[in-house]
Amino acid sequence: MTDTAPARPTAILRGEEQVFYAHARQREVVFQRCGDCARAVFYLRTICPECGSENLSIERSSGLGRVYSFTTQHRAAHPFFQHDVPYTLVLADMEEGFRLFANIVDCDPEQVHVGLAVETVFDDVTDELTLPRFRPRSRLGETTA
């Protein structure tokens, strides 16, 4: 009997997701700004959830934020990721006024806390897919408290 490793789950990108991930491939986090009510809109969509306007433009985020909430996974969501546990998932308030969800890297799960300053880094998962991740902010003079 041959033991085979589980295959990596694949994403099927549709609509605005294709735009977001094309920018991620270029090492950019993008969101939308409503031209009528000025709200930051994320995830990308066709109408503003605040005012219903279709007057949305794409803007580039600084990639900087602070942890709003987090959870550490001790059980893999898919068999492919069983060797990655534990891993910590973060919901971060980005400087531009939207929240982004990603896992945090280069950080012990015990160091993650609400308010932790994070920056976005990018992981080339495959030739076609690049994912944003967070790591604790390392800018000179930036505190992580």
Image (cartoon, rainbow, N blue to C red):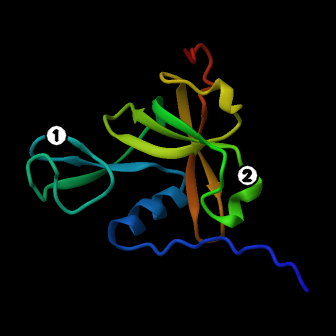
Q: In this view, does 144 lie above or below 38?
A: above
Residue name at image x 51 percent, y 35 percent: 70
Q: Nearer the viewer, residue 78 or 111?
A: 78
Classed neighbour count for the residue bearing mark 1: other residues with Cα under 10 Å, few (<14), some (14–19), many (≥20): some
Quadrant in which the N terminus appears:
bottom right
Q: Residue 91 in the image: x percent, y percent?
A: 45, 39
Q: Is residue 27 above or below residue 121?
A: below
In the picture provided, is 8 more to the left or to the right than 5?
A: left
Q: Residue 58 in the image: x percent, y percent?
A: 30, 53
* Disc 1 versus disc 2: nearer the observer: 2
Query: Which type of secondary structure does the marked residue at label 1 adopt?
Result: loop
Q: Residue 83 in the image: x percent, y percent?
A: 77, 55
Q: Which of 109 and 44 is in front in this view?
A: 109
- The residue to which callout 2 is attached is 84
Q: In this view, does 113 lie above or below 1?
A: above
In the picture provided, is 29 more to the left or to the right than 33?
A: right
Residue name at image x 38 percent, y 31 percent: 95
**Residue type highlighted by circle 2:** Asp
- The residue to which callout 1 is attached is 38
Q: Nearer the viewer, residue 131 or 110?
A: 110
What whole-number distance in Å separates the C-alpha atoms at marks 1 and 2? 39 Å
Classed neighbour count for the residue bearing mark 2: other residues with Cα under 10 Å, few (<14), some (14–19), many (≥20): few
Q: Which of 136 and 35 is in front in this view?
A: 136
Q: Residue 96 carries which label?
A: none
Q: Looking at the image, tell me whether mark 1 or mark 2 is earlier in sequence order.
A: 1
